[in-house]
Image (tube, rainbow, N blue to C red):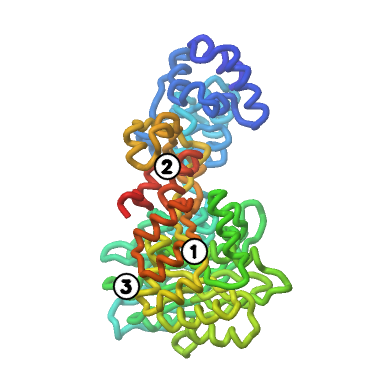
Amino acid sequence: MGSNLGDILLKEKLLDSKQLESAKEFKKKNEVSLGSAIINLGYISEEEMAQALSHQLGYPYINLDQFEVYPDAVELLPVEIAKKYLVMPIHRIRSFLTLAMVDPTNLEVIEDIRFRTGLSVQPVIASESGILNAINKYYGSSDSLRVKQVLDDIEQADDTHVKIIEEEEEDYDIEELTQSTEEAPIITLVNTTFIDAIKKGASDIHFEPYEKSFRLRYRLDGTLFEMMNLDTKFKNPVVSRVKILANMDIAEKRLPQDGRIKMRAKMENGNKKEVDMRVSSVPGIFGEKVVVRILDKEMLKLDLSKLGFEKESMEKFKRGISRPWGIILVTGPTGSGKTNTLYSGISNLNSTEKNIMTAEDPVEYHIPGINQVNIKEEIGLTFANSLRSFLRQDPDIMLVGEMRDYDTVDVAIKAALTGHLVFSTVHTNDAASSILRLVNMGVEPFLIADSVVLVVAQRLVRRLCKKCREPHKISPEALEDIGFSPEEAKKVKVYKPVGCSDCNNTGYKGRVALFEVMEVTKEIRDMILNRAGSKEIKKKAMEQGMFTLRQSGLFKIKDGITSVEEVLRETIKDTEV
C-alpha cells in the first residue's frame, strides 16, 4: 500500500506530511500496514480512507456489512488467502470475479488471484474492518469449517450410518444408541465442537433440543452466541456421545445428571492444552439439554494485580488476607468471578509454612500445594462437616466454597475466632448486604462483628477490544447522570464497541472485574452490633474511602477498559442503594 496510499491521502488533503511521517514510523514500529497505522493513530476513519481511494482511482466503494456475498464466490478462494491479502470475493458473473480489496493498487495480489481462480478480477474498495468482518462471517474459523464439512458428510451419508432412536421414553435400544455415538462423523462433530469452543475461549457449550431444531451455543465473555442450528436427527447421537465421554448413564433420560471430561486439545500454535470440562444434563420436553462448563487453567488468573482491583481496593484486600485470623467474604451472583478471586487470595498466601485446606462443590481447578476436598452431600460430606474435619488437620487457612446454611457459618466463625483465616462466599448484591445475610441465617451480630474482617463484592464486565474500539460521544449531562463529577464529565474520553475479526465481531475481548472492598473497621463493627441496616453500613464504608461497584466501573470507563453500557448493565447508581 506504501507510498501510493500516502500520496492519495495527501492529494485528498486528509493527511499532512507530518502526519504521514508519524504513520510511517508507527507502521515500522508496530509491523502493521500504513493504512492500519493511519487509522490507529486516529488521523482519519476507515471509511474516509476507502472513499479517498475510490475518488482517486475510480473504483466503486461498498459497505460489506450491507452487501450480499454470494456463497459460490466465497468458495473460489481459501480463507488463508483472503486473510493474507485482505480481500473478499463477493460475486462471480461468467469469467469475472468481483473482489473487495483494501488496496486495489496492489497488482501482485490481483494477478495472484487471477491465476488461482482463472477469472478476470474486477476490484471494488472496502474498509479493512469490513473485509475482516466478512471473512469471519462467511468463512468462520477453521474448526467451524470442519464442523460444517462433517455435517455435509452426514447429510450425504446413508441413513444407516447414524442410528436415530425414537423418543418413546420406555422404548429405545441402548446398544443401538451406543453404536450410533461411535460412528466417525458423530465423534468428529463432538470433538471438533469442543476444540472450536476451547480455541474461541468459550466458558460454556450449550446443546439445546427444540421441537424442530437442535441448537448449539457458546458463552463467550459472559454472553451466549448461537454457533449452529442442527437438524433434530443429531440430537440423540450427539447428546449420548457427550454423556458417554462424561461417564454418565445414557439409559437415564428422566433425571438430571452430572459428569466430567478431561481432554487434551492441540492448539493452532502446536502446543497441547489440557482442559477439564464439567457436564450437566437436564431433561426437557424435547429431550435432554446438556451444558458443558470448560475449566481452562490458562484462563484462571492468580495474579491479584490483573484481576481489576483499583490501587486502594487492592491495598485493603491484601491487608485483609494478611491477617492471622478472621473471615474474608467474597460476594456476587453466579459467574461473577468469585472463585478466581478466592483462588488468587489463597495462592498469594500459599507457602510451605502454611497448611491450606479447601472444601469446594466441586473443585474447579487444582492448585499445587493446597489440599482440596470435593463436597459430596449425598454421602454426608457437607461444607460444615468438612470444616469440622479440617479443624482436626492443623490448618492455618481454610476455604469453604459457600456459606449457604447456619451450620457452615457457625463452624466458620468458631474457626475464625480460634486463630484461623477463613475464605468463603455468599450471594448478595453488594458488600454491606452480606452482613444482613449472615444475620438472616441466624448468626448473632456480636459473632459477625468479631469474626468478619473483610467483604468483597464483585461483578464481571466485558473488556473493549483494543483493536476496534472507537471514541463514543456522550453528553456531559448523561455522564454526570451515571456518576461522573461535572469536571470529569467534561473531559473524560469514553469508548464504544465496534467489532472486528479479532473479537468475533462483538467489540469485546475478555472480561475484567469490578470490585467493592469493605473493611470491617471499628465504626462498622459498632454498627453491626447495633443492628444497623445495609444502607447505613454502606454509607459509612463510603465515607471511609470504599469504592463502590459503580465507582469501580467508572474508573474502568475512564481508562478505556470497558463501555458505559457494560457498567450500567452490572451496577446501579449509589444513590439508588
Image: 409 above or below 570: below
Name the N-terminal-most of marks 3 and 1: 3
Q: Amino acid at mark 1?
A: Lys
Q: Quadrant of the N terminus?
A: top right
On the question of residue 176 being in view, the answer is no
Gap between marks 3 and 1 measured at Cα: 56 Å
Determine the residue positioned at 63% across, 80% down.
395
The mark found on residue 522 in the picture is 1
> At 46% from the left edge and 67% from the top edge, which residue is drawn?
525
Which residue does the numbered mark 2 point to in the structure image? Answer: 563
- The answer to whether residue 449 of the structure is visible from this angle is yes
Query: Which residue is denoted by mark 3 in the rendering?
Result: 287
Disc 2 marks which amino acid? Ser
Closer to the camera in the image, 289 or 406: 406
SS for callout 2: loop
* Foreground tag (2 vs 3): 2
Residue 226, image x, y percentages = 38, 54
Question: As displayed, is residue 88 above or below residue 121?
Answer: below
The percent coordinates of residue 136 (x first, y second) are 47, 43
Q: CA distance from mark 1 to mark 2?
A: 37 Å
Question: Earlier along the polypeptide chain: callout 1 or callout 2?
Answer: 1
Q: Are marks 2 and 3 in contact (CB under 8 Å)?
A: no
